[in-house]
Image (cartoon, grey):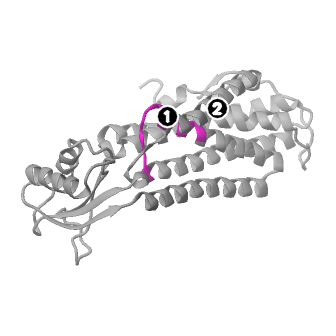
């Protein structure tokens, strides 16, 4: 087939002027960051059961019978109790998950009697999946949930600090500030998306944001590696042109990697059910935002800060890139 594989249709080299529009996109990023921070306080995050407290119970059937998780989730969800979590676990006394046992977690609305709500949940589950055995009913208070939320935020903060230390060790200080600015930008905008879409903020979301931090840092390191290499290679080329050159040289890799990940996450969002929908959406947005920040947040800071030229490579004449198709 002519043109197959389709990757051959992508240009080998591009000559896009990214730095030219860095000021405009910098203003846009600043506005979105401020709006996201405001949104986190008002209307605020839609806290899930992990961070608001609630109740949990173990639901089981005799060995060999399967508990339908989707029916469990739907039955409890119809009661209007907010965030509902359902997870299959190994049968008590064994290490085998035969589908006969599950943990159900749900919120208890403020002002409602806990015992009454638990009985309503049990009645709804029995009506949906038949006779089951209930055990280990427990109520998680708001104090424990607040401690869990604090731990989650500390984990995010520690991840950013460790990434900064890694970049500082691997590159010059200005590269570290550029990378951290990009990371903070990405995290705040993902929080803003969670607020706008009213996605439930749970431990799954914390995991999604940590993954976004890793992806964004990986993409930024790729650009920075090429930038450092080109700074040594083209010592006489203006810094803004070196930045544009470095981004253009890594652009196809960035796009292909990002599109591949988004395709997988889109399938997960569509077919993974309600439990994975928010996680998938946050990751997809994070990949797009992380790619954007590598180009229009992290790299322009290098231009503002400046960088020392040097290295063992000989001076080279600036080059002009054009558009060319893959053979």
Q: Examine the rendering and report whether any part of residue 206 can be seen.
A: yes
Determine which quarter of the picture holds residue 177: top right
The reply to whether residue 255 is visible in this rendering is no
Marks 1 and 2, the one that precedes in the sequence: 2
Q: Which disc is residue 34 wearing? A: 2
Residue at 88 percent of width and 41 percent of height: 307
Distance of label 1 from label 2 (alpha carbons): 14 Å
Q: Is residue 183 magenta?
A: no
Residue at x 89%, y 46% (from the top left corner):
313
Residue identified by numbered label 1: 43
Tell me where the magenta segment starts and ends, as one range: 188-204
Residue in view at x 82 percent, y 50 percent: 173
Q: Position of residue 281 (x, y in %)?
A: 43, 38
For residue 60, what is the image quadrant? Answer: bottom left
Left or right placement of residue 80 versus residue 175 in this view: left
Residue 309 appears at what percent x and percent y?
A: 91, 43
* Residue depicted at 23% across the width and 48% down the height: 73
| Front: mark 1 or 2 | 1
Image quarter in which the C terminus is found: top right
Q: Is residue 90 above or below residue 38?
A: below
């Amino acid at each position: 087939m002519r043109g197959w594989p389709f990757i051959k249709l992508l240009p080998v080299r591009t000559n896009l002027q990214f730095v030219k529009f860095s000021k405009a996109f910098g203003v846009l990023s600043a506005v979105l960051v401020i709006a996201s921070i405001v949104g986190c306080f008002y209307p605020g995050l839609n806290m899930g059961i992990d961070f608001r407290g609630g109740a949990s119970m173990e639901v089981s059937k005799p060995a060999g019978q399967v508990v339908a998780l989707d029916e469990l989730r739907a039955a409890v969800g119809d009661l209007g109790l907010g965030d509902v979590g359902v997870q299959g676990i190994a049968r008590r006394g064994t290490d085998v998950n035969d589908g006969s046992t599950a943990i159900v977690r749900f919120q208890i609305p403020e002002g409602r009697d806990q015992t009454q709500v638990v009985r309503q949940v049990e009645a709804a589950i029995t009506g949906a999946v038949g006779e089951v055995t209930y055990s280990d009913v427990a109520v998680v208070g708001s104090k424990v949930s607040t401690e869990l939320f604090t731990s989650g935020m500390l984990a995010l903060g520690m991840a950013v600090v460790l990434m900064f230390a890694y970049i500082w060790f691997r590159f010059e200080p200005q590269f570290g500030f550029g990378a951290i600015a990009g990371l903070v930008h990405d995290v705040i905008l993902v929080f803003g998306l969670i607020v706008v879409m009213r996605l439930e903020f749970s431990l799954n979301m914390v995991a999604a944001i940590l993954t976004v931090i890793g992806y964004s840092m990986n993409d930024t390191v790729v650009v920075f590696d090429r930038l450092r290499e080109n700074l040594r290679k083209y010592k006489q080329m203006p810094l803004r042109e070196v930045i544009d050159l470095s981004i253009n040289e890594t652009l196809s890799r960035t796009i292909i990697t990002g599109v591949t990940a988004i395709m997988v996450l889109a399938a997960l969002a569509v077919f993974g059910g309600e439990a994975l929908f928010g996680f998938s959406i946050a990751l997809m947005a994070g990949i797009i935002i992380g790619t954007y920040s590598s180009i229009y947040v992290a790299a322009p800071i290098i231009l503002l800060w400046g960088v020392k030229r040097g290295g063992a490579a000989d001076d080279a004449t600036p080059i002009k890139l054009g558009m060319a198709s893959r053979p």
